[in-house]
Every structure is written in C-alpha cells, then in structure tokens.
C-alpha cells in the first residue's frame, strides 16, 4: 500500500513540473510559482480533510520548515529547467535529493533489505546515467549547480515531511504550502517583480498546483511509513519530467540516457519485490 501511494508522487509531480517548466519559460517565474503554491495548498487541504489525521504541533512545525526549503528548491529547479533544459538539471536533482532521505532513514531505522537497498543503488545509477547526455552537457556547470542546489533542498524537504508522525496524515503539507507561498511573495517584493503570472497561463497554473498537491500528499503519507523508499520515488519525479519533456516538448536524449531510464525501471521493480 505504501508503494502504491508513493507511486502517485513521481507521476503527479513529474507531470506538474513538465507543465510548470513550459509555463516558466513564458516569464514571471516567481509569480507563476506563487500561484502554483496557492493551488497546491488548496488541493492538499481537500485531501487532508478527506484523509483525516491528528497532527501534533511538532508535525506542523516540521511541515512549516519544509515550506522554506521546498519553495527555494522549486524556484531553483524551474530556473534550471527554463534556462538550461531538463536533461542535466532533472537527473542531478534526483541523485542529490535521494541521498538525503536515504541517509537519514538509514541512520534512524537501519539499513534496508538487500533487495530494496540494491534497488535504491540501481535507481541512483539509473538517474545518473540519464544525466550523461553528451560531452558538452557534462561541462554545463550551471545546469549541474542548479541540480545540486535544488536536489539538496528537495532532500531536506522530503526528510522534514517524512519525519512527521504517521497519525499526522497530510496535514503537515498545509502549513508548508503557506510558508512556501509567503517565502515566494517575499522574494517577489524584494526583487520588485510582477505578482501575477501571465493571464493566459492561469488555468494551467491551477492544474500544476492541483497535481503538485496530490504528489506532495502521497509522498508525505508514504514517507511517514518508509522515508527511504518514498524519498526514492519522490526523486524519480524528476526523471518523469525529463521523459515528458522528451515526448511532448521534443528534448533530445542520447542512448546513454535511454539506457538510464531502463535501469531506473529495473530499480523500481526491485523496490516492489523488496
């Protein structure tokens, strides 16, 4: 059940980031992100009421802190996607971000089973192969920087949400989205940027927010049971984004990248079997 719920996370967030990347290329990135967080919070609130839960003050505090790291991570990710493409930024984010929750879970709960552990290692290898686009891509230090920074921040976000209690349900996501929105609005005021995204992008921004809310909710529920496995699924969302960009936006991939997707799929099967 945990794995089935966790699978919603990469699919929902991957699709959301695919749409959000194309919206961000229209300009007004911070305004777009703030609108996304508005509808992420609303969709997560509906799911939290439906699912139920009894969060403690500590759970809500952890959720609030995740909003700070999550908002900065998303801004950095979209900056990388919109200026450098997804081929290097996405996999780098996935590899870096997966290390944080897996390391924390291993320190707290001990090492995973050999099959699950092997699947996690293979998953990291898979997303690493996806990043090996070509010689020029490997020298794209700006893309790597975007991926590394956003990966660490997303890893912190995943760890904070995964540290909430199992009885908390989806509720920790709500204060996180409120804090994330406030953080982005503060950046908008500091940089004196537009507060509203382009008029024609608002319906798609609403869709991105709803999908992200589903993804964050499913990740949180899965992470409360097994942070390491849920964290790997969460980071796989960046590979899903790359895949959608290849299929629908025409981004090119190398044979190595395509092999990396196959390796990641095998890794996912190992996690299932474990």
Image: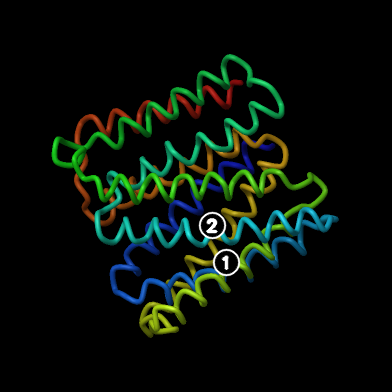
Q: Position of residue 173 (x, y in %)?
A: 67, 59
Q: Which mark is residue 171?
A: none
Q: Position of residue 234 (x, y in %)?
A: 53, 43
Q: Which mark is residue 180?
A: 1
> In the rendered image, which residue does mark 2 sit on?
70
Work out whether residue 226 or residue 58 is closer to the camera in this orientation and state it. 58
Decide if residue 139 is on the left or right side of residue 206.
left
Circle 2 residues within 10 Å: few <14, some 14–19, many ≥20: many
Decide if residue 137 is on the left or right side of residue 236.
left
Identify the residue at image location x=37%, y=29%. Answer: 126
**Alpha-carbon distance for marks 1 and 2?**
7 Å
Identify the residue at image location x=79%, y=46%. Answer: 165
Q: Are marks 1 and 2 in contact (CB under 8 Å)?
A: yes
Decide if residue 212 is on the left or right side of residue 247.
right
Identify the residue at image location x=58%, y=21%. Answer: 273
Which residue extends farthest top?
114
Quadrant assignment for the C terminus: top right
**Is 34 located above or below residue 152 in the figure?**
below
């Amino acid at each position: 059940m945990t794995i089935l719920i966790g699978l919603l996370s990469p699919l929902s967030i991957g699709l959301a980031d695919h749409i959000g990347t194309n919206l961000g290329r229209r300009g007004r990135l911070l305004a777009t992100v703030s609108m996304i967080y508005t509808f992420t919070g609303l969709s997560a609130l509906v799911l939290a009421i439906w699912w139920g839960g009894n969060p403690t003050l500590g759970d809500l505090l952890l959720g609030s802190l995740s909003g700070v790291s999550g908002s900065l991570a998303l801004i950095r990710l979209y900056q990388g996607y919109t200026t450098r493409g997804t081929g290097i930024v996405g996999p780098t984010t996935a590899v870096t971000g997966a290390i944080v929750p897996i390391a924390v879970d291993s320190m707290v709960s001990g090492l995973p089973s050999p099959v699950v552990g092997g699947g996690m290692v293979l998953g990291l290898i898979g997303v690493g192969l996806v990043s090996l686009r070509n010689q020029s891509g490997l020298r794209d230090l700006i893309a790597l920087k975007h991926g590394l920074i956003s990966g660490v921040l997303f890893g912190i976000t995943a760890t904070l949400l995964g540290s909430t209690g199992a009885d908390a349900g989806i509720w920790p996501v709500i204060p996180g989205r409120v804090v994330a929105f406030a953080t982005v609005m503060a950046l908008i005021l500091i940089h004196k940027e537009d507060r509203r995204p382009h008029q024609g992008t608002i319906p798609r921004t609403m869709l991105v927010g709803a999908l992200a809310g589903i993804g964050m909710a499913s990740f949180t529920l899965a992470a409360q049971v097994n942070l390491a496995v849920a964290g790997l699924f969460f980071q796989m969302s960046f590979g899903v984004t790359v895949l959608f960009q290849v299929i629908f936006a025409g981004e090119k991939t190398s044979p190595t990248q395509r092999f990396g997707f196959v390796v990641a799929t095998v890794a996912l099967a190992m996690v299932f079997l474990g």
